[in-house]
Image: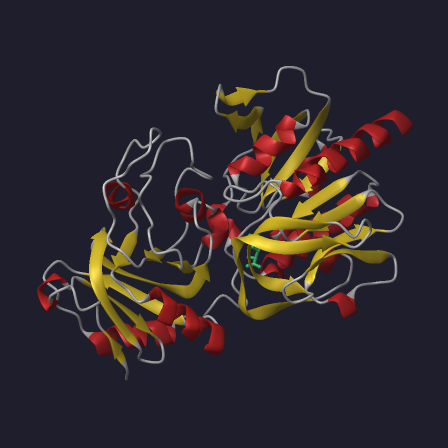
Amino acid sequence: MTDSTRSPDHSSSDITAVLVLADGTVFRGRGFGVEGDTVGEVCFNTSMTGYQEILTDPSYAGQIINFTFPHVGNVGTNDEDMETKKPAARGLVIREDITLPANYRAAEHLEAWTAKQGLIGISGIDTRRLTRIIRERGAPTGVIAHAKDGKFDIEKLMLKAKQWPGLKGMDLAKEVTCLEAYSWTGTRWTIEEGYGDLKSPKAHVVAVDYGAKHNILRCLAETGARVTVVPATATFDEIMEHQPDGIFLSNGPGDPAATGEYALPVIKKLIDTGLPIFGICLGHQLLALAFGGTTYKMAQGHRGANHPVQDLRTKKVEITSMNHGFSVDAASLPADVMVSHISLFDKTVCGLAHKTKPIFSVQQHPEASPGPQDSFYLFEEFMALILNHKKAA
Ligand SMILES: NC(=O)CC[C@H](N)C(=O)O
């Protein structure tokens, strides 16, 4: 068992949390948020901003996020930067203790916010060492335990980490999807006006919510779509009752193959309608499975806000926001589906386009939140396909 204590400027009396990995590695630090313990896959995110959007991205269900940027919390939190109502992430690991927030939009200290959201956090951790462990050995299972008295049963926590089954084979979309269909018309945030509202919709999109980030819905509305969001388990008939002009398949947590068990029969029927379909992240992976392809678990995944992706059709490179731990196997795709985008980090598949149908998907996050907005054009391409299809109908 290896042990990594807090940096030397902290005395052992303020050790109120531990992060214990399944292999017995122990990190000691200061706890914040609620007391108790939490288990999940430990992944790392390299974004330098946007911790609130990351913590509230439903795709992090089942995961503990190790932030590589050392100063997390300095701009506080607010009511606007929520990507969903309740964070699905299991916990957070950060380097420096959280300072007082300094930003005109700050409404609350990250520590108070974390407690209110029921999250467990640990600070004072050598996040660089933890990142190296993830890079070298793949994303491990870990437990963060937070107790103000500083007493921990390390063996028991290690066992808890060991016994957690891992994300492979886990369907988590059901845990984060909406319970009932709802409509969405909110548009993107601007510094002058905050969030806007779509006044005259050009088309109606039904978005299947496997754990949709709100900024995706805002981006769809921004291009003129009135959106009806339906639960992940919505049937084909339930979707078609809304009379969509286009279908959107959202991002979401867990293993696409597991979610596919109930999602694929519906998606296959949606493909046959000839309607335009756009998928992001989990939606992209599910689309690949529906086409007959396969997905696999990556060793460490991609999570950050500066990932270069190339559009193979135009050769243009876009800098993107990423959050995924599974990927589509290019060799598994049928002949009528082309790989449209690839990651310039490792050449993994980042986009698919059907050769004859108005159907496409991407692995990156064109809605950013956080991150660059280079890929926003994909929402515009989706709207163009929808308007074309409407005109032809
Ligand atoms: N952001 C997402 O939709 C993630 C998709 C999937 N859960 C993965 O980790 O690859």
Task: Left or right? Give the position of 156 relative to 352.
Answer: left
- Residue drawn at the location 63% of the way across and 27% of the way down: 222
The image quarter containing residue 1 is: bottom left
Residue 376 image point, x, y percent: 66, 38
Residue 224 lies in quadrant: top right
> On the rendered structure, is 160 left or right of 148?
right
Q: Nearer the viewer, residue 299 or 175?
A: 299
Depth check: give the residue in front, 161 or 10. 10
Image position of 362 with respect to 387: above or below? below
Nearer to me, 121 or 341: 341
Count every numbered label the image shows and give the total: 0
Question: Which sits in the foreground, 49 or 20?
Answer: 49
The x and y percentages for residue 62 are 43, 59
In the displayed structure, does residue 327 sit left or right of residue 165? right
Residue at image coords 50%, 51%: 59
Query: For this view, does 124 lie left or right of residue 364?
Result: left
Residue at coordinates 69% horizontally, 65% vertically from top-left? 347
Residue 286, percent across and down? 67, 55
Residue 388 % position (x, y): 85, 30
> What colouring method underlies this structural image?
secondary structure
**Residue 393 visible in the displayed image:** no
Residue at 22 percent across and 72 percent down: it is: 5
Camera sees residue 321: yes
